[in-house]
Amino acid sequence: MSGAVSSLVIAVPAHDEAASLPAALRSIRRALAFDGLPGVRETHLVVAADACADATAAVAARHGARVVEVAHGKAGAARAAAVEHALRLCRAPAEETWIVTTDADCVVRPSWLARQLEAAGHGWDCVLGTIRIAPLPPVPAALRVRHDAHYFADRAGPGWVHPHVHGANLGVRADAYRAAGGFPPVACGEDRALVESLPGAARVLRTDACPVLTSGRTAPRAPGGFGVFLRDLAGHDGRMRGVGPGTGHV
């Protein structure tokens, strides 16, 4: 089954991320230049600057991203706003448009987009990637061990079909995205809600082939996200209080 992509959307929600955004956008630019991304005729990189009190919007524009400024204060609404802004610019039909999302405190690999498009070309409708905690800011060794023990608990070999869902490393075909109703306007968990709403016939690939580096900060920008999980993990000796690293906005 073929699923050729001619339009590529990269959506990045950001709330007061002027400090971390340059590294994120530089990494996305490297990924856009990787092997030329054959077949892609247009790309749209959009940052949704959500309720920002810093220079996030200016930084994003300076690094070549289109910027949509919103005041939702919700990761789901911001992520959706970035996607919708980009989709309005796309000339290709939805079935030839691929949406990828990451977060403003993440760094993607050069091959990240190429891996996403390879999966799309093989007919997958959604790609759920994994994360790794970035080396900076430093995370205490004991906390990193606890996180990894939880995150990789069910990994049995190189073909790991992982259970996680991260807006920081997610791709979806635009027609499947539309059928699912898009990212809901929630404070966190919009990534998992989208995946749970995909049509039953949607083909979902869960892969560890191209993880994204994400910040290990424990002062998160969104409630209920990865930073809260790490903070609880550090402060409660691994008891989760209903929050896991496969949910929410980093």
Image (spheres, rainbow, N blue to C red):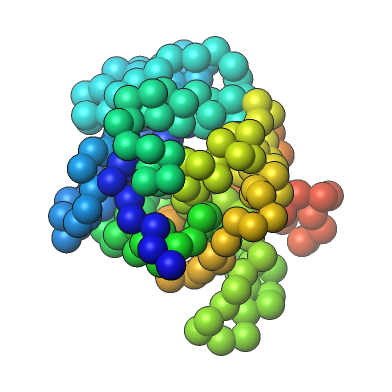
Q: Is residue 207 left or right of residue 25?
A: right
Q: Nearer the viewer, residue 142 or 51?
A: 51
Q: Dividing the picture into quarters, in which one does residue 69 lie?
A: top left
Question: 246 left or right of 92?
Answer: right
Q: How many marks?
A: 0
Left or right for 63, reference 137: left
As drawn, the residue found furthest toward the bottom would be: 157
* 31 relative to 26, above or below: below
Percent coordinates x, y for residue 22 in the rendering: 29, 36
Indicate the position of residue 147 as horizontal and vertical percent values: 64, 64
Residue 5 or residue 9, whichever sits in front: 5
Which of 208/175 is in front? 175
Which residue is found at the position 82% from the left and 50% from the top? 242
Query: Which residue sits at x=20%, y=43%?
Result: 41
Q: Quadrant of the N terminus?
A: bottom left
Regarding residue 151, the answer to whether it shows in the image is yes
Q: Position of residue 66 (x, y in %)?
A: 30, 24
The x, y position of residue 42, in whole percent, is 23, 38
Q: Is residue 28 above or below residue 149?
A: above
Q: Residue at x 43, y 45 (%)?
A: 95
At 57% from the left edge and 77% from the top edge, which residue is drawn? 160
Q: Quadrant of the C terminus?
A: top right
Q: In the rendered view, tell whether residue 156 sits above or below residue 178.
A: below
- Regarding residue 227, the answer to whether it shows in the image is no
